[in-house]
Image: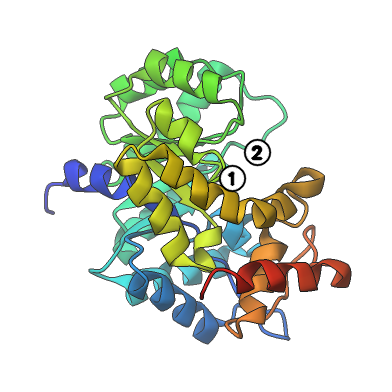
Amino acid sequence: MSTPDFAVMRGALADVVAIPVTPFTDEDTVDTDAHRLLVRRLVDGGVRTLTPNGNTGEYYALAPEERRAVTELTVDEAAGEAAILVGVGLDVPTAVASAQHARDTGASMVMVHQPVHPYVSQGGWVDYHRSIAEAVPELGVVPYIREPRLHGERMAELGELCPNVIGVKYAVPDAARFASFARDAGLDRFVWIAGLAELYAPSYFAGGATGFTSGLVNIAPSVSLEMLTALRAGDYPAAMKVWERIRPLEDLRAAHRSADNVSVVKEALAGLGLCRRDIRPPSRALPHMHRSAVSALVAGWGI
């Protein structure tokens, strides 16, 4: 087995980390043909890091065999052209099995979803991620942090225990907390990814992030990459011009505690003729009253 190249993996995380949608057929199965075309469109559009089984991919609404199929399809379609960071999670045995499947399929990294449990302790959080990371030492591991009460010192502890934990997807909507957490954990030890996408990317880059996740990239890869180029150059006025352009659409996604986060993206893709707008409960298809607004906003992006 070849030695894992964590430097290459770290470089892939310091980028636009795309979260592909999972399209469905009218029979509520994964539309593999549409899925393959959407992945190809991202790669051809210049995206170099993909996260199958992320939240924009409706991870929690997919059956285990569907999550495996999504992983396999993404690796197959993007092989050699993009780094694959597979979303894993739920109970430890399920997360470990998913990580091992990702490894065996050819992915180089896994992103561990925030633990779904009503009683998460700080030490238990470390143990959870350690169990997964130690099961796949050849993969880069990226915790997805949505819990504002987690201490940066715990992230540092996990990094000491598991050298393959190489990045952090930080998704707490507080730029000051992010900057503090990153420094308490180790600003240079991990690659810091702004996990709340483009609207938070400029403020999180100012605090030390070097990559950001995106669901919007499904609609317009060039827009997300334009923001990345500006942020890498330290050109915050240019980055904020992109921010201003996409804000109305992202506000629709964030409304009502992100009830229509994925629905808005799928509506835009449906308007472009790229996939159906179907979405699974507990999410919903975008209400008719908002569909024309999505079309109008996307029309100005030159897609």
Q: Secondary structure at mark 1?
A: loop
Q: Indicate the position of residue 257 as horizontal and vertical percent values.
A: 77, 43
Q: Is residue 173 visible?
A: yes
On screen, 231 above or below 175? below
Q: Indicate the position of residue 99 as horizontal and vertical percent values.
A: 40, 51
Residue pushed farthest left?
Answer: 2
Query: Residue at image x 28%, y 25%?
Result: 189
Query: Residue at image x 59%, y 58%?
Result: 56
Name the one closer to the observer, 159 or 248.
248
| Residue on which the image places disc 2 | 116
Query: Residue at image x 51%, y 86%?
Result: 33
Q: Contact, CB < 8 Å: mark 2 with mark 1? A: yes
Going from N to C along the chain, the mark reached first, 2 or 1, is 1
Q: How is the image coloured?
A: rainbow
Q: Is residue 254 left or right of residue 274?
A: right
Q: Amino acid at mark 2?
A: Val
| Residue on which the image places disc 1 | 90
Q: Is residue 12 left or right of residue 239?
A: left
Q: CA distance from mark 2 to mark 1?
A: 6 Å
